[in-house]
Amino acid sequence: MYTKQSLSILEKALDKLSEGFADLPPFAIDFPVGTEEIILEVARKMQDNFPYHHPLYAGQMLKPPHEVARLAYMLAMWINPNNHALDGGRASSAMEKEAVAEIALMFGWKEYLGHLASSGTFANLEAIWVAGQIHPKKKIVASELAHYTHERISQVLGLKFQKIGCNKLGEMDLKKLESQLSKGTVGTVVVTMGTTGIGSVDPLPQIIELQKRYDFRIHLDAAYGGYFRLANTLPEATKNKYSLMEHADSIVVDPHKHGLQPYGCGCILFKNPEVGRFYKHDSPYTYFSSTELHLGEISLECSRAGAAAVGLWATQRLFPLVKNGLFSTRIDRSHIAARKLYEKIVGDKNFIALQPPEIDIVIWAKKERSISEINKATHLIFEKAPLKNLHLALFNYPVRLLGSHWRNIEKNETHVACLRSCLLKPEHDDWVDEIWNVVVECAREISL
C-alpha cells in the first residue's frame, strides 16, 4: 500500500529542514509515554474505511494524494505555517503564490487575483460573495445538476438563487437560461465544468455568446473537472468548452481532487484583480511584518494551512500543468478508463448507459423492463459488489432527462437509480476489465 522508501525521503528532508534552524539553542520536547500505542490504535481504527487508494474503489470522487504531495505536506507540518499573514508563513505563502500562478496560467490567465482555500465549497463561496457585491440585487443561477453548494451558499449570503433545467445531455438548457436572462434579474451564471453527478459539462461557448447580449457574470465551477482543460482525449465538443475557460469572470478548481492533493486545498481565481477592493480590511496585529501582499488580505478565510500550499507547490514541480506532460497523461488515462467502461456497458445487451462520458464519470444500470425494476437491480448490485471487493456509488437521475435509447423502458417512477463510477485514478485504465467482470458476475447472481 505504502512504501518505506517515502519515509526515508522524509527523514532526509527533515534533516535538511533542521539545518535552517541550527543556530537556535536546543530545548526539550515532550514526548508522552503511550504515544506509540495510541498511534497504533489510530491505525487499527483507520482500517474501518473503504479502500479509496485501490483501483477497485470505483465509486465516489475520492483520489489519494500523490506521494510527493503527502511528503511535502508532512514535512511542512513540522513548521505548521499559517498562510494568512507573512509572519505566519513566509516560505509557504511564496509557494502558494507560485502554485496559484501556475493554475491561473493553465486557464490562460497571466493577470488575475487568486489564492488557495480550505475547500471548493469555500472557494465557490468567495466567488458568489464577490458576484453578490457586484450585482447585489440580482440572482445567482446554476443548472439543476450543478453542485448543491451553490444554492446553500446563496442562502448563507442572502442572495436569490434559481435552478435552470437541463437538456437530455445533462447540460444547462440554453433556452431556459435565456428566458431568465431576458428578464434582467440574473447577475451571475454558474457554469459547471464537470458536474459531480454525471460529469456533464455546461455549454460554455453558447453562454459566452449570451453574455454579449445580457449583463451577467460567468463563474466556472470547475472544482471537479477543471484539470480536464489539459486533456487530449476528450470529445471535440467538450474540448471546445474547455478551450474557452479564460473568458470567465471567476474560476474555482479543487487541487484536492484531480490535483493530487490531500483534502483542504481549493482554489479561487478572479479574472479582474480589481475585485480585491471587496476584500479590503485591516488587522491590528498581523499585517505589519512586510509591505508585500499578505494572502489574508485577499481571502475571507483567516488561518489557512500553509502545508496545503507546500504540497501543491511540490506536486506541480514534479507534474507541471502543461499539455502533453506527465500530469496531463494521467488526466487522459482517467478519461480513457471511463470510455473503456462505457464501451463495456453499451456492448452488453443486459446493461444500459446514461450517455458517453464527457470526462471520467460513468453512469449505467442493468437493463430491465421498467424503471422500478432497474432501481431494484441497481441496489442489489451495489450491495453485492463490495463482497467481491468492488466499490461503486449510486446516483438518482431524473427520468424526464433520459435519452431516446431508454424509450422502451416503462417510466413508472420519477427517478432512476443508476450505478456510478468516478474513475479518477490513472490506474483505473488497467483495471476496467476486472471491474466489469465483477459487475457482470453480480448482475448474473441477482438474475438467478
Image (tube, rainbow, N blue to C red):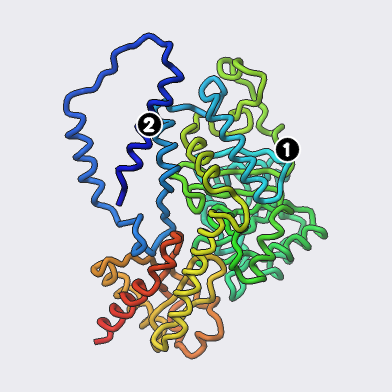
Q: Is residue 448 above or below residue 279?
A: below
- Residue 415 appears in the figure: no
Q: CA distance from mark 1 to mark 2?
A: 40 Å
Q: Quadrant of the C terminus?
A: bottom left
Q: Nearer the viewer, mark 1 or mark 2?
A: 2
Q: Secondary structure at mark 1?
A: helix
Look at label 1 and name its amino acid. Pro
Pointer 2: what residue?
12
- Residue 362 appears in the figure: yes
Q: Residue at x 36, y 62 (%)?
A: 55
Q: Quadrant of residue 395?
A: bottom left
Nearer-the-camera pick, 320 or 81: 320
In the rendering, at what x and y percent does residue 259 appear? Answer: 51, 50
Nearer-the-camera pick, 28 or 444: 28
Q: Residue at x 31, y 75 (%)?
A: 438
Pointer 1: what residue?
273
Q: Quadrant of residue 367?
A: bottom left
Q: Is residue 175 left or right of residue 125?
A: right
How many numbered marks does the figure carry? 2
Q: Residue at x 49, y 27 (%)?
A: 82
Assess disc 2: are there few (<14), some (14-19) or many (≥20) residues with their C-alpha within 10 Å of its C-alpha. Answer: few
Q: Secondary structure at mark 2?
A: helix
In the rendering, at what x and y percent does residue 138 appear? Answer: 70, 50
Of pointers 1 and 2, the one earlier in the residue sequence: 2
Q: Is residue 13 left or right of residue 333?
A: left
Residue at far right of view: 213
Assess disc 1: are there few (<14), some (14-19) or many (≥20) residues with their C-alpha within 10 Å of its C-alpha. Answer: few
Nearer-the-camera pick, 5 or 333: 5
